[in-house]
Amino acid sequence: MNQNKKIPFSPPSFNEKEIHEVLEVLRSGWITTGPKTKLFEQKITEYCKCNKTLCVSSATAGLEMILRWFGVKAGDEVIVPAYTYCATANVVEHCGAKSIMVDINKDDFNISVEAIQKAITEKTKVIMPVDIGGYPCDYNEIYQLFEDEKIKNAFSPENEIQKKLGRILIISDAAHSIGARYNNKMIGSVADVSVFSFHAVKNITTAEGGAIVLNLPEPFSNDDIYRYLNTMSLHGQTKDALAKTNKAGWKYDVIGAGYKANMTDIAAVLGIGQLERYQEILKHRKYIFETYSEAFNRYKWAILPVYQNNIKSSSCHLYMLRIKGVTEEKRDEIINKINNNGVSVNVHYQPLPMLSYYKAKGYNMNDYPLAFENYSCEITLPVHYALTDDQLDKVIKTVVEQVENADIKRVD
């Protein structure tokens, strides 16, 4: 390894087969939504053992489309964690509804079920848990909330879809967690709806892209919902470009003011290739997590991320190390020194109430003490398929050196 070359944080990984398949798509002349996109949807459905999958242009688009399908509008409330990327709450804003932010667990960065319970009102239409870093939320406990008569009776449906469900909708923001498992089920087959991201830094990437994964209970038809969402991802147009190639296929209708949110075959063919070797990718990511945890476990200042227990297994997307006794300012200094010594690190995430837009809307960081506590001492380390043992060794040595050289409160 060139010691002078900086270790990147999360570069994408493509093999020669995937590159060749992209060239084949380009040569085919069919580059927008077509047979490769439909095949990718089928592969995801098989992998997650879910009911139906629609590939879209981004996870953000997928989240908003589901909120709008459910009829979320001005006056409604959607419960989200204060600790997440801004897209989770932004889509609620797009619908005119209000994000009800709640605090997180101390140990694993995920939304607190106790905080959800306290936040539910008659205006609550959706709960949107986020699997931070790829570690699944407490889905059993979230669904058990609906056994509470007070919560059950508080739900106030305002359209036929909401009446049919008869309770708050659970949308899993699973942007990080494809490949994770919960209670012997793949994430994607746990919540009513899950939405994956295939952004450039994700475990599986299509450069940009996402997928809406449907598991709505009877009497819903997931096939019918898929067809509706597919139409709405194409401006509400009843025929896509592939359908128009059929005899007399030019004529179409528009059933609503939809979106331009479809995935292209260029993107989909990358996803197909990555999914084919995903077990190999996951194995290497887990090895990186295990290597980091074994190394940092000997230091009293290190709080290791939880990535598996008896019912949960992470997709190992983000290794979120915390430093005991460090302030936010000192953490930032440590990050700068680690970066200056040839290792790219990051922070995931600035809690939403710290961001100017949400701060101006009245959200106060003091209301989310655990979110701030976890954020202020967190450093995300590199995890990617190309990371070598030599690079892992350098990351560990650099982090240890900079933390131990920092003037922080000593931990006994």
Image: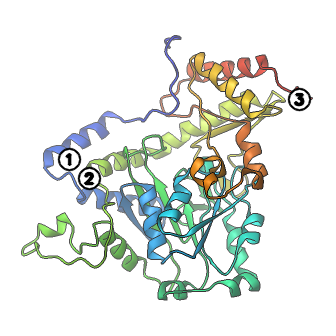
Marks 1 and 2: in contact by CB < 8 Å?
yes
Q: Which residue is mark 1?
A: 25
Task: Give the Cα separation between the discs numbered 3 and 2.
Answer: 53 Å
The residue sitting at 66% across, 19% down in the picture is 398
Q: Which residue is mark 3?
A: 411
Q: Is residue 7 above or below residue 261?
A: above
Mark closer to the chain start, 2 or 1 = 1
Across and down, in percent, residue 381 comes to 61, 32
Q: Quick check: 378 left or right of 197?
A: right
Q: Secondary structure at mark 2?
A: helix
Mark closer to the chain start, 3 or 1 = 1
The answer to which quarter of the image holds residue 151 is bottom right
Q: Quick check: 369 left or right of 281?
A: right
Across and down, in percent, residue 121 comes to 69, 77
The residue sitting at 59% across, 29% down in the picture is 345
Instruction: Specify the quadrant that holds the C terminus.
Output: top right
Q: Secondary structure at mark 1?
A: helix
The residue sitting at 60% across, 39% down in the picture is 286
Q: Quick check: 377 left or right of 94?
A: right
Q: Quick check: 125 left or right of 401?
A: left
Q: Is residue 386 above or below residue 308?
A: above
Q: Which residue is mark 2?
A: 265
Q: Residues within 10 Å of mark 3 (few under 14, many from 20)?
A: few
Marks 2 and 3: in contact by CB < 8 Å?
no
The answer to which quarter of the image holds residue 52 is bottom left
Mark 2: amino acid: Asp
Front one among 253 and 263: 253
Across and down, in percent, residue 97 comes to 54, 70
Q: Residues within 10 Å of mark 1 (few under 14, many from 20)?
A: some
The residue sitting at 50% across, 26% down in the picture is 8
Mark 1: amino acid: Val
